[in-house]
Image (cartoon, helix red, strand yellow):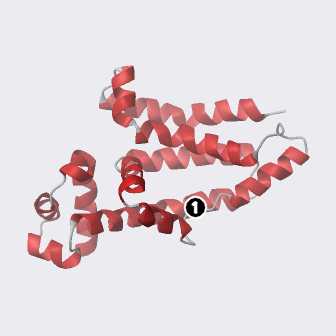
Amino acid sequence: MTTEEKIFNAARIVFQKKGFAGARMQEIADEAGINKAMLHYCFKNKQLLFEAVFKNAFSQLAPQINAIFSSNETIFEKIKQFTHSYISFVIVNPFLPPFVIQEMNNNPEFVKNFFKNENSPNPYLLIDQIKKEIDLGIIKPMNPKQLVLDIFSMTVFPFAAQMMVKGILHLDDAEFNLMMEERKTTIAEQIINSIKK
């Protein structure tokens, strides 16, 4: 394992436990088994490290999502695959949705530029397919972008507002994770049942 891989793995663990604000570079260095000087040599500050971890994690997710969007599967199958892939990914990287929201407020240019990247998930193939399947009478007439927003919202929100969801529903970590596993199928079923003609 390279030093960078050790740092990314350590940073994920610390950011997951402490969040961005609570994480300290010394803790990340200790978790990676390197000294703080080496960590600062690789990443000058915590913000740059977090952005690198964010890009590294999403570089693993984006190809999966783009493969789903560009496949020859039906829209129903794509919804099932998306909810399963995204939720599986965020269960392993739970710090990412709150970070995106934080960065949209604190560093909107980073998020904006990141999602302009050619390797970021591209929903337009999915949107075009939705239009075609509406024309074919497979799904109900609707604004395709609203459907894509529904799919993203229902999968992203519980992770982005995890503390609130746990508080309202009185869930501990194990119960929350179990609910998220269930949502891999329940979200897809709800959306598919609502759009089927």
Relative placement, left or right, of 97 versus 80 is: left
Q: How many marks?
A: 1
> Does 168 appear above or below 72?
above
* Residue carrying label 1: 121
Left or right? Give the position of 131 relative to 171: right
- Residue 127 location (% of width, % of height): 73, 54
Q: Can residue 156 be seen in this view?
A: yes
Q: In which quarter of the image is the N terminus?
A: bottom left
Query: Residue 189 appears in which quarter of the rendering?
Result: top right
Residue extending farthest right: 136
Q: Is residue 1 visible?
A: no
Report x, y in % for residue 125.
72, 60
- In this picture, residue 138 sits left or right of residue 46: right
Task: Check disc 1 and report its element: helix, strand or loop.
Answer: loop
Q: In which quarter of the image is residue 193?
A: top right
Category of crowding for the residue at label 1, using alpha-carbon neighbours closer than 10 angstroms: few (below 14), some (14–19), many (at least 20): many
Which amino acid lies under the numbered mark 1 shown in the image of this protein? Pro
Q: Residue at x 27, y 61 (%)?
A: 9
> Which residue corresponds to the image point at 42% horizontal and 55% vertical from the top-left?
104
**Residue 147 appears in which quarter of the rendering?**
top right
**Relative image position of residue 130 (x, y in whole percent):** 78, 49
Residue plotted at (45% across, 62% down): 111
| Residue 129 placement (x, y as % from top left) | 78, 54
Observer-nearest of 135 and 111? 111
**Which image quarter is the C terminus in?**
top right
In the displayed structure, 103 sits above or below 36; it is above
Q: Which residue lies furthest to the bottom in this view?
A: 41
